[in-house]
Image (cartoon, grey):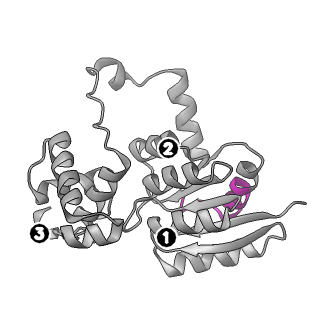
């Protein structure tokens, strides 16, 4: 049986420890690295080029969806298994749209995660049973609510850099700190901030924080301006 190399990405040490114990017990899975932030995940994926990345969505400094997008761009042969507490359609479809090959809920059985890793390593997709059922229902017939409702306005698309700046703003980073984090000039950061505000039609930091929390870009406990929520 061929060996599957795995990068674990979660900002909670206890979760990574549990996943590591679960997966290393399998003879065909090897943990090559662990990351605590989305940005660290991208760097470690580029360094180790793992077969599979197990990715949380609510990650500091770079959320799991954007980290997934960047990992797959840097290492196209890697497969991403999202392991998240979010069960709503918005997070699910965001993850699929950026290339995740599997989506599991954290309350899923450990055996499902092992199976998901093996399936995506073979080039297949894998979803938690409840999510797979929902996806099948979506492809068969739209819900009555969707049929009756007016077409929804598509989400505003931010560039990769704008998305990174938005998350760091929402986490409470100042322009100078963001510049250092992303290797940009303060002037460039200010330009990205203005573009984000214009695209989203949000013109204050509290509004950006609220938007980031509502869209699952950050968790409310990571927000830099919690009093604004």
Q: Is residue 110 magenta?
A: yes
Nearer to the camera, 115 or 99? 99
The secondary element bearing badge 1 is classed as helix
State which region is magenta. Answer: 105-117
Q: Residue at x 60, y 69 (%)?
A: 8
Query: Residue 217, relative to residue 140: is it above or below?
Result: below
The secondary element bearing badge 3 is classed as helix
Q: Residue at x 60, y 63 (%)?
A: 45
Mark 1 lies on residue: 40
**Visible in this render: residue 216?**
no
Mark 3 lies on residue: 227
- The outermost residue toward the right is 1
Q: Residue at x 27, y 27 (%)?
A: 152
Q: Earlier in the sequence, mark 1 or mark 3?
A: 1
Q: Quadrant of residue 154?
A: top left
Query: Residue 134, relative to residue 75: is it above or below?
Result: above
Mark 2 lies on residue: 98
Q: Quadrant of the C terminus?
A: bottom left
Query: Residue 145, relative to residue 96: is it above or below?
Result: above
């Amino acid at each position: 049986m061929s060996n599957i190399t795995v990068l674990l990405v979660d900002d909670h040490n206890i979760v990574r420890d549990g996943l590591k114990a679960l997966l290393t017990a399998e003879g065909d899975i090897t943990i090559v690295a662990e990351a605590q932030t989305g940005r660290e995940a991208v760097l470690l994926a580029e360094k180790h080029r793992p077969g599979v990345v197990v990715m949380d969505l609510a990650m500091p400094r770079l959320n799991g969806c954007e980290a997934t997008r960047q990992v797959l761009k840097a290492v196209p042969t890697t497969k991403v298994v999202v392991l998240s507490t979010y069960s709503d359609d918005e997070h699910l479809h965001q993850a699929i749209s950026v290339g995740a090959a599997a989506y599991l809920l954290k309350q899923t059985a450990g055996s499902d995660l092992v199976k998901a890793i093996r399936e995506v390593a073979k080039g297949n997709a894998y979803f938690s049973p409840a999510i797979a059922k929902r996806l099948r229902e979506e492809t068969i017939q739209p819900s009555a609510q969707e049929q009756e409702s007016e077409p929804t306005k598509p989400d505003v698309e931010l560039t990769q850099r704008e998305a990174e700046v938005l998350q760091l703003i929402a986490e409470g980073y100042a322009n100078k700190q963001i510049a250092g984090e992303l290797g940009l000039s303060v002037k460039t950061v200010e330009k990205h901030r203005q573009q984000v505000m214009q695209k989203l039609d949000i013109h204050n930091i509290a509004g950006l924080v609220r938007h980031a929390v509502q869209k699952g870009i950050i968790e409310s406990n990571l927000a830099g301006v919690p009093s604004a929520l």
